[in-house]
Image (spheres, rainbow, N blue to C red):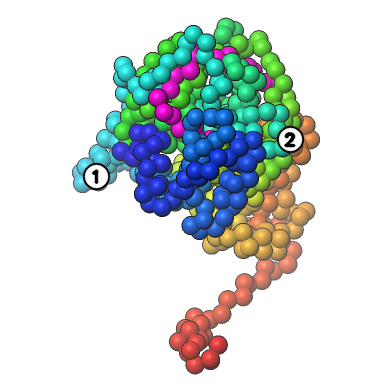
Amino acid sequence: MAWHDLRQFVDHLERRGRLRRVSVPVSRDLEITEITDRVSKASGDANVALLFERVDGAEMPVVINAFGSAERMAWALGVDRLDDLGERVAKLLDLTLPGTFAERWRKLGTLLDVVKAAPRHVATAPCQEIVETQHPSLAGLPVLRCWPGDAGRFITLPCVFTRDPVRGQRNVGMYRLQVFDDQTLGMHWQIHKGGAEHERRGDDRMPVAIALGGDPALTYAASAPLPPGVDEVVFAGWLSGAGVEMVRARTVDIEVPAHAEIVLEGYVDPAERRTEGPFGDHTGYYSLARDYPVFHLTAVTRRARPFYPTTIVGRPPQEDYWLGKATERLFLPIIKMMLPEVVDMNMPAEGVFHNLVIVSIRKRYPGHARKVMTALWGMGLMALAKTIVVVSDHVDAHDLSEVAWRATGNIDPKRDLMILEGPMDDLDHAALRHRFGGKLGVDATEKGPLDDVAQAWPDEIVMSDEIRERVTRRWKDYGL
Ligand SMILES: Cc1cc2nc3c(=O)[nH]c(=O)nc-3n(C[C@H](O)[C@H](O)[C@H](O)COP(=O)(O)O)c2cc1C
Ligand SMILES: [Mn+2]
């Protein structure tokens, strides 16, 4: 198993030299943001997780940027490289294929991983060392004011637990929460997300629990675009190699992760709305003030000495980019299963997840790139992608310079651009209307007989192997 709580992971990061403690007093108003923004954009060893030990006016230390690099994100999920996750998913998808006895025997290990992923129910839990049900208050939390134009303080790294009022299925989503006062929060679940769907299906007060901290795999799972009905807690258990321990909340009929640092219990009334935002968002712009549901607090339960985990979002790259990268690597095998022509995929930091998806494909028939674009626009939250650029299989989708070269040189805008309209991310500030707007598909593959070309397609310039080897061999002789 990887980790069962945040502090284990924090300890590990510290032992490996990937966490710095800041022991001078700092303000939770903007100062932590500016420090973290610089650290998360720093290169190499200067990009570390941070533990602020003395935050003005608060007893709890603040942990931030724990997932903020490829390495730390991979470690959080119990692997050394993010691509190892994709390989695990690929093995899982391969399970149903028939094979020899030896192959099936090897697959048994993968099956066992699935069995081990089931949540475990416990009666007592570290997240309930302290239970406040009499006059529960958010006042003790060192919630950050992130950016100068923010409407207030926002809890930014929560796992929000809800239950489908009709079917009873659980959902866990990461939705930011604006602190309205000591007992109420803005519940920023966007219309396309699981929490909003649960709210829509019920008429009564809906129980909600918000966990801060716990198994890092669960924090990640809350951010992952799992299909509706897939339980994030089971997924987290599969990722970390052992079922997540869950305990009943004290004032609402919901289970919460036993090893969370802090749990906020309460409810959302589907009839109630309040203005939430503006908030400096991961697009690099402020998301506008809009009406969202309200969370009412009925209990705070916590460890005796909890950490307060949080993150900041803003102009990329920041910590959230790495949560998205983990998703890209994990979900690639699933996309490949449905679209076998797909070779690789890249959602670069500059595209803040939904603005730019680069996908490389093996092209076999006329219109193939368009087929891939439209299929992706029909797949879960990928429906919100604004621009999809399709390149050929031999192109490195992660080399933005190469992609820009091909995507400008290989297109005729009249033939190779597809513009259509569809659902847009809540945060898209340029869309025609809120949540609806134009989408662009760019077919940047080389054109040939499969395509509508009126002139011969030229060969790409490549030096002969013989000369390349000769020059490599003689490189020292040139005195360069
Ligand atoms: C740091 C961070 C903050 C996020 N904030 C929000 C948010 O405020 N509202 C929202 O709908 N999605 C937010 N997301 C994206 C969701 O967590 C993501 O879409 C996830 O798939 C939602 O889970 P669900 O599909 O179970 O609803 C955020 C993601 C990250 C990494
Ligand atoms: Mn979900």
The reply, left or right, for residue 176 in relation to residue 161 is right
Q: Residues within 10 Å of mark 1 (few under 14, many from 20)?
A: few
Q: Are marks 2 and 1 in contact (CB under 8 Å)?
A: no
- Magenta segment range? 291-310
The relative height of residue 217 versus residue 204 in the rendered view (above or below) is below
What count of labels does the image hold? 2
Amino acid found under the numbered disc labelled 1? Arg
Quadrant location of the N terminus in the rendered image: top left
The relative height of residue 296 versus residue 54 in the rendered view (above or below) is above
Q: Is residue 451 visible?
A: yes
The Cα atoms of the two marked residues, 2 and 1, are separated by 55 Å
Which residue: 61% across, 37% down? 27
The reply, left or right, for residue 258 in relation to residue 356 is left
The relative height of residue 293 versus residue 346 in the rendered view (above or below) is above
Whichever of labels 2 and 1 marks the residue nearer the N terminus, that label is 1
Q: Nearer the viewer, residue 61 or 403?
A: 61
Q: Which residue is mark 2?
A: 149
User: Which SS class for mark 2?
Assistant: loop
Quadrant location of the C terminus in the rendered image: bottom right
Q: Which residue is mark 1?
A: 106
Q: Nearer the viewer, residue 434 or 55?
A: 55
Does mark 1 have its CB less than 8 Å from ligand 2?
no
Which residue: 78% across, 53% down? 414
Amino acid found under the numbered disc labelled 2? Gly
User: Which SS class for mark 1?
Assistant: helix
Residue found at the far front of this picture: 24
- Prevailing secondary structure class for the magenta stretch in the rendered image: strand
Which residue: 69% across, 69% down? 456
- x then y, percent, for residue 191: 64, 25
The reply, left or right, for residue 64 in relation to residue 7 is right
Q: Is residue 340 visible?
A: no
